[in-house]
């Protein structure tokens, strides 16, 4: 699968890739990651100070897994905004509103992370859960997230990365391109397509070191990276 690199083409491509998979998304994510995705989200949330009133922007929120996890821990006067370009994924996220108990107000917005429809300096945190690879213009998204953050705001991301260990990487590649693809074919042709994209997006993803360099380049400071689960996933954290 050839993944487009231009902003318009990749945005359109990603929107199509995540169409017709929203119903099974949460269940299959738990299955494919052996429920480690819940641990990864907790690691992301551990970097957030929930003791104060705040506004949080969850980019590429999908079905709202991170968005609602934030809402469950945030104070009553806080606001969490989930943003995604996929209407079906946002529809699935909205559907959880009536079955998920949260402490604060949650809103969903359809837009792209490279052009955020918010004024400067309003969010205390910007989060991205397992979706950093999906942005067509990562520098543009980093700049926009920096713009909408408060003076002491933080950008936090947890995402799949390439493993450094060549032996583990060989095993992991087999899992990505064979085990998961076989699972996708069993579910639907749409999931087969989506999992081909997932595998290839990890294969061509830039390194965490390069992401830290880009974050510093646009104006962030103290960018750090932590490996999680044998290095399959990495946590990025950086301060405005």
Image (cartoon, rainbow, N blue to C red):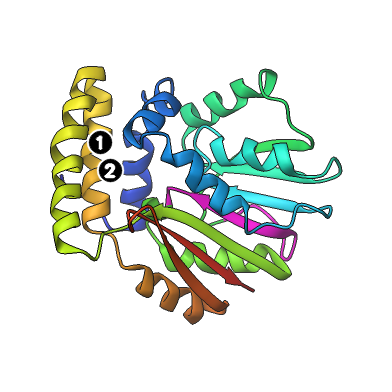
- Magenta stretch bounds: 116-131
Query: Height in image: 37 above or below 188?
Result: below
Q: CA–CA distance between discs 1 and 2?
A: 5 Å
Q: Which mark, by number, is residue 195?
A: 1
How packed is label 1: few (under 14 Cα within 10 Å), some, or many (20 or more)? many
Identify the residue position indicated by label 2 in the image: 198
Q: Quadrant of residue 154?
A: bottom right
Q: Is residue 211 visible?
A: yes
Of the pair 227 and 200, the residue shown nearer to us: 227
Percent position of residue 225, x then y: 45, 69
Q: Nearer the viewer, residue 213 or 175?
A: 175
Q: Position of residue 58 (x, y in %)?
A: 59, 48
**Residue at image point 49% right, 64% down:** 236
Between 229 and 192, the one lying in front of the other is: 229
- SS under mark 2: helix
From the viewer's perspective, is residue 53 above or below residue 174? below
């Amino acid at each position: 699968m050839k993944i487009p690199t231009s902003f318009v083409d990749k945005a359109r491509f990603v929107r199509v890739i995540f169409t017709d998979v929203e119903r099974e998304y949460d269940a299959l994510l738990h299955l494919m990651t052996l429920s480690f995705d819940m641990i990864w989200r907790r690691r992301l949330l551990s970097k957030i100070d929930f003791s104060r009133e705040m506004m949080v922007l969850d980019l590429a929120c999908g079905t709202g897994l991170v968005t609602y996890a934030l809402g469950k821990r945030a104070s009553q006067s806080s606001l969490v905004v989930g943003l995604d370009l996929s209407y079906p994924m946002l529809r699935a996220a909205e559907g959880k509103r009536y079955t998920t108990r949260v402490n604060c107000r949650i809103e969903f917005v359809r837009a792209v992370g490279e052009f955020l429809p918010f004024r400067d300096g309003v969010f205390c945190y910007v989060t991205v859960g397992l979706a950093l690879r999906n942005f067509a213009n990562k520098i543009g998204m980093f700049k926009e997230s920096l713009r909408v953050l408060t003076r002491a705001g933080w950008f936090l991301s947890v995402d799949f990365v390439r493993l450094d260990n060549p032996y583990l990487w060989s095993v992991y590649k087999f899992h990505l391109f064979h085990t998961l693809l076989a699972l996708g074919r069993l579910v639907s042709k749409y999931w087969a397509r989506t999992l081909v994209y997932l595998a290839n997006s990890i294969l061509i993803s830039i390194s965490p070191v390069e992401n830290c360099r880009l974050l510093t380049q646009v104006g962030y400071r103290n960018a750090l990276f932590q490996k999680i689960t044998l290095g399959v996933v990495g946590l990025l954290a950086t301060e405005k």
